[in-house]
Image (spheres, rainbow, N blue to C red):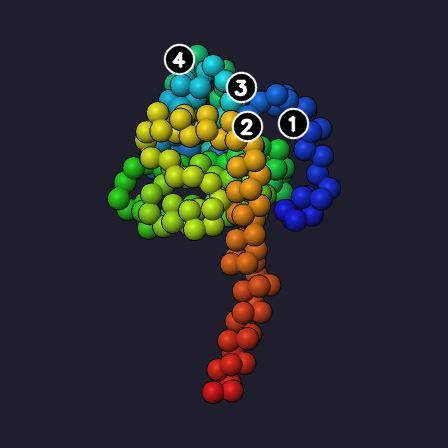
Amino acid sequence: MSDHLLHTFDVEKFREQQQWAGKFVITYVGAHGVANHLDQVLETAALLRDTNVLFVLIGQGMQKNQLKVLAQSMSLSNVLFLDPVAKAEVFKYIFASDMGASVLKNVETFKTVYSNKTFDYMACKKPIFMAIDGVSRDLVEEADAGIFVKPEDANDFAHKVRHYMDNPALIKRQGEAGYSFAKQNFDRKVLADRYINYLKEFANV
């Protein structure tokens, strides 16, 4: 699905429809629960009021209403909450974004967790703000597909957002790198071929 969209999707038209024209869009797709601690995104947005950054949060969860109230109390006009959308539609939002974000609470347990949306961002050639330490951070750094952000550190997050806003060439390069890494390591056909070759080698032992 994402490969087809890469060649057929009219990004500019979609951005105009969403009123994203002229915005630096960072999209988060996933749960809005206690474990995600999306307060850190709102705190980052507050530090970036002077920019054209727009955080788009897509999903549902027990903290969503509370987050909306918090965003309103902080007078944040640069955070957009959207309801969950179908997988095919999610790819459109990611394609139309500048970067993606993977976010979890700063808990030791999450260092062993892979954020599944990270792979969607990579498939859409979008670099990732990885606010999860451990194996997810290792993946993004190995693939050169984004940058690690200290979990629950809005100052670090905002600083790194500004860095990317000033470096469009970095965004393009890391987007391509993440896509290539995902194709080489997680594409089902590639994995199937690798498994078949392994079986052939095993059979000839």
Q: CA distance from mark 2 to mark 3?
A: 8 Å
Q: Is residue 89 left or right of residue 156?
A: right
Residue at the spot 50% in from the left edge and 18% down from the top edge: 51
Q: Position of residue 127 (x, y in %)?
A: 51, 39
Q: Which residue is mark 4?
A: 73
- Residue in the picture at 54% in, 81% down: 200
The reply to whether dot 1 and dot 4 touch (C-beta < 8 Å) is no
Q: CA distance from mark 1 to mark 3?
A: 14 Å
Which residue appears at 54% of the width and 64% of the height?
A: 191
Which residue bears the numbered disc 3?
Answer: 52
- The residue that disc 2 covers is 25
Q: Where does the image place residue 59, in percent across and percent down from the top left?
A: 49, 34
For label 4, the crowd category at 10 Å Cα-Cα, with few meaning under 14, some 14 to 19 and many 20 or more, is: few
Q: Are marks 3 and 4 in contact (CB under 8 Å)?
A: no
For residue 28, above or below residue 137: above
Between 156 and 68, the one nearer to me in the picture: 156
Q: Amino acid at mark 1?
A: Arg
